[in-house]
């Protein structure tokens, strides 16, 4: 079969591009640990508040068998706030979530009403919050600072005001306080 020279070049270029996309995908998954957030469980959003497991937003400590401590943070998204169980608010009335540098936190997020978004600035956390689904994603806070949690899914008139703030306290400062 005769293949024109130019056509052959294009075929080679296309194969190289596809191969590099595939290599990037494999590198992302294997080397950089990129994981898609997966819905682990279904829940009836109307019965969410009665759920013994997920009904009460808040942070809890999880101690592994080897004594290492991580955290789980249950968060409800609803028009137009993230309900986090935190008692602390900033000047805009938004929840402040405090963690320490080095903390590994698994966010368990679901919606009480409609679809929202959940994204943490400068961290590998970014997903849709779909009513009826419990999403779970784990991240580690290595750099002290303040990071916004944003709803990036248009959810109505106050969408742009739907955010919260994560404050990562430096490890040394917190150990001095405690
Ligand atoms: Cu919630 Cu936009």
Image (spheres, rainbow, N blue to C red):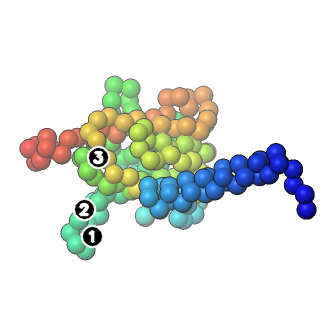
Left or right of 3 on screen, residue 32: left
User: Which residue in the rendered view is the most extreme toward the top?
Assistant: 91
Q: Quadrant of residue 106?
A: bottom left
Q: Secondary structure at mark 3?
A: loop
Q: Position of residue 8 (x, y in %)?
A: 80, 51
Q: Is residue 6 above or below residue 29?
A: above
Q: Position of residue 9 (x, y in %)?
A: 76, 48
In front: label 3 or label 2: 3
The reply to whether discs 2 and 1 touch (Cβ–Cβ < 8 Å) is yes
Q: Secondary structure at mark 1?
A: loop
Q: Residue at x 29, y 60 (%)?
A: 70
Disc 2 crowd, CA 10 A, few/some/many (<14, 14-19, 20+): few
In 3D space, how far apart are the residues under numbered discs 1 and 3 (Cα atoms)? 20 Å
Can residue 38 be spotted in the picture? yes
User: Which residue in the rendered view is the most extreme toward the bottom?
Assistant: 65
Q: Residue at x 26, y 50 (%)?
A: 102
Q: Which residue is mark 2?
A: 69
Disc 3: residue Cβ within 8 A of ligand 1's nearest atom: no
In 3D space, how far apart are the residues under numbered discs 2 and 1 (Cα atoms)? 6 Å
Q: Which image quarter holds the N terminus?
A: bottom right
Left or right of 28 on screen, residue 58: left
28 or 59: nearer the viewer: 28
Q: Residue at x 23, y 40 (%)?
A: 169
User: Which residue in the rendered view is the most extreme toward the left?
Assistant: 176
Give residue 142's mark: 3
Q: Quadrant of residue 120?
A: top left
Q: Which residue is mark 1?
A: 64
Q: Position of residue 90 (x, y in %)?
A: 33, 30
């Amino acid at each position: 079969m005769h293949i024109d020279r130019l056509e052959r070049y294009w075929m080679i270029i296309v194969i190289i591009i596809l191969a590099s996309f595939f290599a990037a995908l494999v590198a992302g998954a294997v080397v950089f640990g990129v994981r898609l957030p997966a819905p682990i469980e279904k829940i009836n959003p109307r019965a969410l508040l009665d759920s013994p497991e997920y009904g009460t937003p808040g942070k809890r400590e999880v101690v592994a068998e080897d004594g290492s401590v991580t955290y789980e943070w249950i968060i409800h998204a609803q028009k137009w706030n993230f309900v986090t169980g935190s008692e602390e608010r900033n000047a805009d009335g938004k929840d402040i979530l405090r963690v320490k540098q080095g903390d590994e936190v698994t966010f368990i997020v679901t919606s009480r009403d409609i679809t929202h978004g959940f994204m943490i600035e400068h961290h590998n956390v970014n997903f849709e919050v779909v009513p009826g689904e419990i999403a779970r994603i784990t991240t580690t806070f290595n750099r002290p600072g303040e990071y916004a949690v944003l709803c990036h899914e248009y959810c109505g008139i106050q969408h742009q005001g739907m955010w919260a703030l994560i404050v990562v306290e430096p490890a040394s400062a917190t150990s001095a306080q405690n």
